[in-house]
Image (cartoon, rainbow, N blue to C red):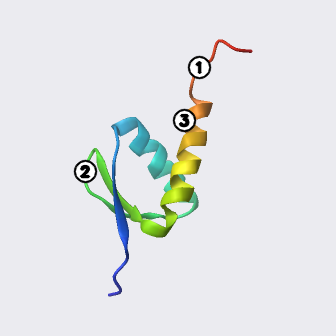
Amino acid sequence: MKAIKGILLTCDSAVKQILLTMNEKESFIIEDLDDFHLVIKADEEYRVRRELETELEKNTYSLEG
């Protein structure tokens, strides 16, 4: 088995569900540890964080129209 460099992410359950959904499109999760921790591929960290930020902005209510 080949070793894969990973990053430990700590997040709440809502963010984890978003990450699991994102992972279905393009696999980056190495291990789902528990309700608050995931290990993702280190070389995917920047892309995952950027896409997660975009998803969270879609779900943020704004008074500005």
Distance from the alpha carbon under mark 3 to that under mark 1 = 10 Å
- Residue 12, located in which quarter of the rendered image? top left
Is residue 2 positioned above or below 8 on the image?
Answer: below
The residue at 57%/29% (across/down) is 59
Density class for disc 1 (Cα within 10 Å; few <14, some 14-19, many ≥20) is: few
Density class for disc 2 (Cα within 10 Å; few <14, some 14-19, many ≥20) is: few
Give the numbered dot on residue 61: 1
Q: Check disc 1 and give the amino acid type.
A: Tyr
Q: Residue furthest front?
A: 46
- Residue 7, located in which quarter of the rendered image? bottom left
Q: Check disc 3 and give the amino acid type.
A: Leu
Dot 1 falls on a residue whose secondary structure is: loop
Lower sequence index among marks 1 and 2 = 2
How far across and down, in percent of the image, does residue 6 sit? 36, 68
Give the numbered dot on residue 34: 2
- Residue 2, located in which quarter of the rendered image? bottom left
The residue at 74%/15% (across/down) is 65
Q: Check disc 2 and give the amino acid type.
A: Asp
Is residue 50 positioned above or below 64 on the image?
Answer: below
Lower sequence index among marks 3 and 1 = 3
Quadrant that contains the N terminus: bottom left
Dot 2 falls on a residue whose secondary structure is: loop
How far across and down, in percent of the image, does residue 56 sit? 54, 35
Disc 3 designates what residue? 56
* Left or right for 11, reference 44: left
